[in-house]
Image (cartoon, rainbow, N blue to C red):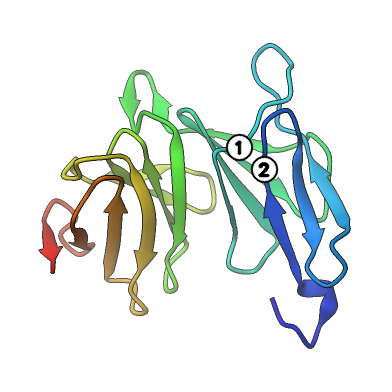
Amino acid sequence: MNSLDPDTCFLASSSRDNPVHLWDAFYGEVRASFRPYNHLDELTAAHSLCFSPDGTQLYCGFDKTVRVFYTDRPGRDCEERPTVVKKQGQSGIISCFGFSPCQSVYACGSYSRCAGLYSCQDGTLLALLPTRHHGGLTHLLFSPDGNYLYTGGRKDPEILCWDLREPGKGRVLT
């Protein structure tokens, strides 16, 4: 988003019984709508939303699934990326996203208290971090050099710092 370029200024929202909307940040008007449907062909709300770093994609978190919409193609067409395949992977509602500033990698946090690292190209699971939080994850942030991932959860008095060069080891920040 650049306030000097109004065409880049928009935000996304999701609410029950409504599509995901892109809103014009200057005028408050709906610019586009994206319609995620469930297996019964009913409109369903995303639990989390995040734009790709270049703004061309909108990542939406659902139960055991990430759906990726292209911002230049409103409607119902999307790429579906399950986070659980053959009973393996990251379960729970995908509650937050973060993008690496250095690699083509994104992180998903879930209410099942864990974080997963995924390929931006096809959504392949690259690593599943151990469950160390007391509650579901609500925040993810990569360090500027991309070597660390910070995670925070509900009812959790601490932030964990994951060294992504050794993903199995998380340390507590105070």
Q: Position of residue 121 (x, y in %)?
A: 54, 52
Going 70% across and 45% down the picture, which residue do you hit?
Answer: 69
Residue 102's place in the image compared with 83, above or below, is below
Q: Secondary structure at mark 1?
A: loop
- Residue 92 is tagged as none
Residue that numbered label 2 is attached to: 14
Going 77% across and 54% down the picture, which residue do you hit?
Answer: 22
Q: Secondary structure at mark 2?
A: loop
* Nearer to the camera, 121 or 163: 163
Q: Position of residue 2 (x, y in %)?
A: 71, 82
Q: Position of residue 110 (x, y in %)?
A: 37, 39
* Nearer to the camera, 125 or 91: 91
* Nearer to the camera, 151 or 124: 151
Residue 91's place in the image compared with 136, above or below, is above
Say which quarter of the image contains residue 148: bottom left
Residue that numbered label 1 is attached to: 46
Say which quarter of the image contains residue 94: top left
For the image, the number of numbered tags is 2
Q: Quadrant of the N terminus?
A: bottom right
Going 45% across and 29% down the picture, which residue do you hit?
Answer: 64
Asked whether the beta carbons under mark 1 and mark 2 sit within 8 Å of each other, the answer is yes
Residue that protrudes farthest toward the bottom in the picture: 4
Residue 151's place in the image compared with 79, above or below, is below
Q: Position of residue 87 (x, y in %)?
A: 33, 19
Question: Reading the chain from its start, which is encountered first: label 1 or label 2?
Answer: 2
Q: Residues within 10 Å of mark 1 (few under 14, many from 20)?
A: many
Q: Amino acid at mark 1?
A: Ala
